[in-house]
Amino acid sequence: MPAVTFDLFTAFVAAGALVLAWLVYRKTAPAPGSAAQATKGERLVWAITAAAAVIAIGGYLGGGVKGFEYREADAPPVPRDSSSAVLVPGQVAGSGPAGHGP
């Protein structure tokens, strides 16, 4: 497992998440006299969701998604002979009409 690092970009993302959460919480405060008012719990959920979105997007921009990258160095070696190939009985792909297409 790679070590966790704390760099300047991470500090900016964390600060941005906290600032956005505070802004969302303040902007969703109930207006005096309005018919529908958000509860304190709803406002907290919206603020936490906004902060989590900033952290997720910032993490993606900072390091990328490593789990979906394909690297040739990580691929298992492919045997050069056909002794390990599995023989599948039936038609070969493209040898006959499939019922659609030209």
Image (cartoon, grey):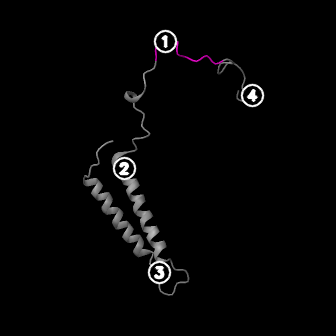
The disc at residue 61 is 2
Please tell me the numbered disc located at residue 99. Answer: 4
Could you tell me the amino acid type at mark 2?
Leu
Chain-order first, disc 4 or disc 2: 2
- Residue type marked 4: Gly
Question: Mark 3 and mark 4: span between their CA atoms?
Answer: 62 Å
The image shows residue 96 at horizontal and vertical percentages of: 71, 20
10 Å neighbourhood of mark 1: few (<14), some, or many (≥20)? few
Amino acid type, mark 3: Pro
Mark 1 — residue? 81
Name the residue rendered at 28%, 45% in the picture: 3
Q: CA distance from mark 1 to mark 3?
A: 71 Å
Label 3's element?
Answer: loop
Residue type (three-letter) at the residue carrying disc 1: Asp
Report the residue marked by disc 3. Answer: 30
Where residue 54 sits: x, y (%)?
A: 39, 59
